[in-house]
Image: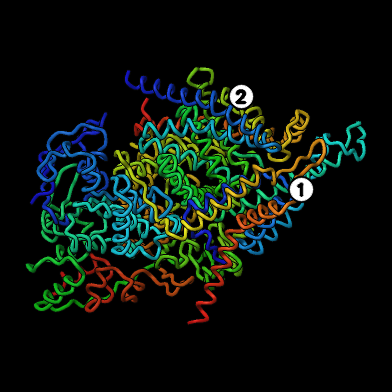
Amino acid sequence: MKDSFATFHPIVNFMYFVVILLFSMIFMHPIFQVIALISAITYSIMLKGNSAIKFNLLYMIPLLLIMALMNPAFNHEGSTILFYLNNGNPITLESILFGMAAACMFVTIVIWFSCYNIVMTSDKFIYLFGKVLPALSLILSMVLRFVPRYVAQIKVISNAQKCVGRDISQGNILQRARNGITILSIMTTWALENAIETADSMKSRGYGLPNRTSFSIFRFDSRDKIVLMIMLGLTIMVVIGGARGENTIRFFPSIKMVAMTPLSMVVYLVYFVLCMIPVIINVVEVMKWKSIQSKM
Amino acid sequence: MEIYTIKDVSFTFPEKEQDTLSHISLSIKSGEFVTICGKSGCGKSTLLRQLKTILTPHGKRTGEIYYGGQPIEGLDQRTQASEIGFVLQNPDNQIVTDKVWHELAFGLESLGYEQSTIRLRVAEMASFFGIQTWFHKNVSELSGGQKQLLNLASIMAMHPSVLILDEPTSQLDPIAAADFLETVKKINRDLGTTIIMTEHRLEDILPISDRLIVMDAGVIIADDLPHKVGQILSEMNHPMFCSMPSPMQIYAGVDNDLACPVTVKEGRQWLNAFLCDNKPAEMVDTKETIGISSRTVITFKDVWFKYEKNSPDIIKDLSFEVKEGQFYCIVGGNGTGKTSTLSLISGILQPYRGKVLIGGKNTAQMNAKELFTNNLGILPQSPQTLFVKKTVEQDLYEMLSDKPLTKEEKAVKIDAIVKFAELEDLLAMHPYDLSGGEQQRAALAKVLLLEPRILLLDEPTKGLDGFFKEKLALFLKKLNADGVTIVMVSHDIEFCAKYAEVCAMFFDGSIITSNTTQQFFAGNSFYTTSANRMVRHVWPNAVKVEDVIERCQTSR
Amino acid sequence: MPDKQVTGKRLSGRTVLATVLILIVIPATMMLGILVLNDRKYYFISLLIVLYTMIPFAMVFEKRKPQARELIVIAVLTAIAVAGRGAFFMLPQFKPVVAIVIIAGVSLGAEAGFLVGAVTGFVSNFFFGQGPWTPWQMFCFGIIGFIAGILFEKGLLKKTKLSLCVFGGLATLLIYGGIINIGSLMMFTSQFSWQALLATYISGFWFDMVHAIATVVFLFFISQPMIEKLDRIKIKYGLIEK
C-alpha cells in the first residue's frame, strides 16, 4: 500500500518523527507507552505489511522479554521486595515493572525507527539539511551515489579476480582473507582514480562559486500547512499535560502516578491522535478515493 | 562570428620534454559542429581541456586562446561554468549526486539560481531529452546511455553557448551511441549551440559534422569538410585513414573521379554511378579454409540459465561448440545474454539445466585452479579490475606470486610476455597512468602469464581507437597461431568481420545463426558491415573493405 | 605562511565553539535533564552531548567552503567504508570501518578523519537501519578518526604498520567499546549504575575484542597500500595541498 503520509513535505515528516520519538522516549506512563506502542505497530504494518508483523513477533517480543528480565538483575531499588537472590541482592516489584516499561519503550522506539527508515528517505534528509549544511549534505548525496556503485564494482572485481584463479570462496582462510583484501585494495585505487573525473565534473559545472543555492522538488502546500498546524497544536497540549504531571510515573522507591481525571483522559486522547496522524491520513485518503471512484 | 580563436598554442606537461600540443592555430565559428579525431595520445583531449581553464591540466602553455574575442584567462569562472559545457568520457564518473533530478539541477545550484528558475530549466531539459519517465529514479538504476544523456542534459540546463565533448560515446554500445549523437545533432540544429567533439566512431559522426580536424602528435594535419579530409589523408597515405568510414576508404582505393561518399547511402549512389561505365566483376568466392580441428574445447549442451528462481530466463536452450584453435565471435544486441554466456563458460555462473563442458569436463565439477591454470583465461571488460600494484612490472610479478617458480624463471616468463605485449616502455608506470589501449595490453599480459589455452574476451574493442584495435587484432592473431582458442563477445561488427573465423549471432538468450565469418555476414542483410551494406545489391558476398576494392578494381 | 594562518584560525574557531558548548550549552542541558526529565535524564543528556560535540566539526567544515576535491576524497573514503561494512555483513563485528577511518585521519588530517567516521556511521545506517544507536556510532567513529589525525600531527602516531595497528586495536577496544557500551546501557535500562556499566562492558567484551582484532587485521593488511594510494592522489592531482 502506498503511504500518503510520506508524500507530505519533508518538514512535516521529520517534525512528526522528532516529536513522536522524543515523547516515546520521555513518557514512561503506562498508558502513554501503550498508545505509542500500538500506534507504532499499526503504522509499521501499514507501511510494510506482513513483513512488519513477522519482524514484530520474531524480534521485538523476545527482545522485550529479555530486556524486561535484565533490569531487575542489576537494579535493586524499590520498596516491595519479592525475594532475594543467592548473592543477597533483592528483587523488587518496582524494578521488574520498571524493566518492563523500559523494554517496552525501547521496542517502541525501534519500531518507530523502522517506520522512519521508510518514510524519511535520504533525499528528504538531504533536502532538510541542504540549506544549513550544504557541503555535508552534498557529501551525503555523493556517498549515497557511490555506495551502490562500489558494491557493484566489488562484484565485478571479485569475478575478474576469480578468473585469474583468485577466488574468495575457495582456499584456506589465510588465502581467502588475502584475496579479499586484494579486492578491497583494487577497489580503493579504482575509486580514488575515477573520483578525479567526478571532481572535474563538479568544477566544470561551477561548484565552488559563491552563493550556491539548493534546489528541491518538494513543495510546501496548504495541506502541509494544515497538518503541521494540527501537529503543533496537539504537541503543545501534550506538553501542557506533561508539565502538569499527567504523563509521568515514578517507579522508585514505590510506584506513583497522578490519579486519572477527565483532564488526563483528554491528554491521552490528544496523544493518541498525534501518534496516529499518519494512520489517520492514510485511512482518510483511502475513503476519499473510494467515494470518488463510486461517483465516476 | 568566431567563438574560439586559438593562436599558435603549444603545451608541455610538467617534467616532459616533448610538446603535447605544438603550434596549434584554429578558429571555430559560432554554431559550427566540429569533430576532432586522431589516434589516442595525439593531444586532442589536451587541446579540448585548454578551452576551459578550470579543466586545464598543469603544464606550460604558450600562445593565446580567445573566447568570443576575449582572452580565456580573463573570463571569470561563473561565465565559464555556464557558457562552456564540457562532457567527459566516462558516463559514471561524471555523475555527482544520487538522484536524477538533483543531478540535473547541480550546475544551476552552483550558479546560484532561484528555486523557480531551476524548476523551469530542469523541466525544460527533462522534456527536451525525454527524461520525464526516469526523472525520479536513483542514478544507479540507469543504463550507460541514459547516464551519458543525463550528463549532457545537466550541462545543457545551464544554457551553454558551446558544448565540448571528449569521446562521449566510447563507453556506450552502438545503439546508445547513435542515440546520443542524434541528441547532440539536435542540440546543434535546434538550439544553434556550437559543438566541439572528439570521437572514434566516425561512421556516425561525419555525416552530421561541418568540419573534421585530424591531429597527429600534437599537430593539426588536416582541417576541412569531412569528405575533403578523407581525400587529404588518403593522399598523405596517413594511418588515420583506416579509421575513416568504409565508403570513403573504398572510394580512395578505387581509381575514379566522382564525388567522395561519406555515408552508406552516398556510397551506394557512388557505386551505382561507378558501375554505369563498368561491368561488375563476377567474383568466384574464395572458399574460406578453416583448419578443422577434431577436438572440441567448449561445449554447451541445452543450457538454461536465470539469475533468480522467479526471474526470466537469460539463456534459453543454448547449444554450441567451439573447436580448438578457433577464433569465435559472438555478436548481438545489449541484454541478449552474451556476457552471461561468457560467465557460464568461466564457471562464475552455473546453468540450472544442461551442461557446460570445457575440454570434455563439466565446469560445475572443476575448481578455480583447474579452470584457470593453463586452461581458461578471461580478459575482463574493464582492465582496471586486474591492477593491484603501483607499477606495471610489479603487477605482472604479482600474477606469479603464488607459483612455485624461482626468481629467474619468473623473470624469464615476464620478459617474454613484456616483449609479446610491447610493454617495455611502460613497465615503470602506474597502471592507471596508461591510456585505455595500453591498460588493456597490460591486463592481457597479466592474463597470458597464466598461459591459457582458451582466451575469453568481453568487448575488448570498447573505447579503443582504430590504431589500438589493429594492434589488439595482431596480438590475438599471434595467439591464435600458437593454437590458443579465442572466444570473443563484441558489438563491433567491423572488427569481427575483419578478424574472426566463425561468427555467431545472439538473440533472446540463444544463438540464432552461426557460420564462417564471410558466410555469416553475407547472409545477414542489416546486421552486417557497412561495406557489405553498401554493395550487397551487387556483390552480396563482399564483407570487408578490401573485398569491395578488389571487386571494383576488376570491374572493367 | 598563509596556509598556517588558515589552520590556526580553523582550530581557534572550533575551540571557541567548543568552549561555548562545554561551558554553557552542555551544563544547561544537564540542568534541564535533571530538573525536567526524571527517569530518562541519563539517556537524554548523553545523547544531546554526543550530538553537541559533532556540531563544531560540521560548522567549521561548512564555514570554510571546502573545495570539490576535498568533498570527493571524503565521500570516496566514506563510501568505501560503508561498502566495506556491507561487504562483511556475514561476519558480525568484523568490519573495516575503524581501519579506514584511522587511515583517513592519518593521511588527510584530523578534520577529514572525523568527517569520514561520522558520515560513515550515519550513511551506513541508511542501508542497515537508523535507530537510537546512530548518534553514538557517528560519534565513536568520528572521534577515533579525529584522535588519529591529532596524534599523527603531534608525531605520536606514525604511518608504520606497527604504530597504526597498536593505535587501532586500542582505539577500537577502549574508545569505541568504551563509549558505545555506555550508549547501549543508557538505551536499554535508562538507570545508570556502575555495576550495570561493568556488566555491560563484560558482556560486550568479546564483541569489542573481535572488533578490535578486525581493526588490527585490516590495518595490518591495507594501511600501507591505502596510505600509498592516498599519497599518490594527493600528489598527482593536488587534491589536498600541504
Near-viewer residue (C17 or A253): A253
Q: Which part of the image, by quadrant, shows the C terminus of chain B?
A: bottom left
Q: Is residue A162 above or below residue B23?
A: below
Choose top left, top right, bottom left or bottom right for residue B486: bottom left
Q: Chain of mark 1?
A: A
Classify mark 2: helix, strand or loop.
Answer: helix
Tag count in the figure?
A: 2
Query: Would you say residue B498 is visible in this rendering?
Result: no
Q: Residues within 10 Å of mark 2 (few under 14, many from 20)?
A: some
Q: Chain of mark 2?
A: C
Decide: marks 1, 2 in contact (CB < 8 A)? no
Q: Do dots 1 and 2 share one subunit?
A: no
The quadrant in which residue C203 appears is top right
Residue bearing the label numbered 1: A259
The percent coordinates of residue B331 (x first, y second) are 40, 66
Q: Which mark is residue A187?
A: none
Q: How is the image coloured?
A: rainbow
Residue A66, compared with residue B352, is above or below; it is above
At label 2, which amino acid type do we have?
Val
Say few, some or many: other residues with alpha carbon within 10 Å of mark 1 (under 14 / 14 to 19 / 20 or more).
Answer: few
Residue closer to the observer: B417 or B92:
B92
Q: Residue at x 36, y 64 (%)?
A: B132
Q: Which residue lies under the disc numbered 2?
A: C166
Residue C32 percent coordinates (x, y): 61, 32
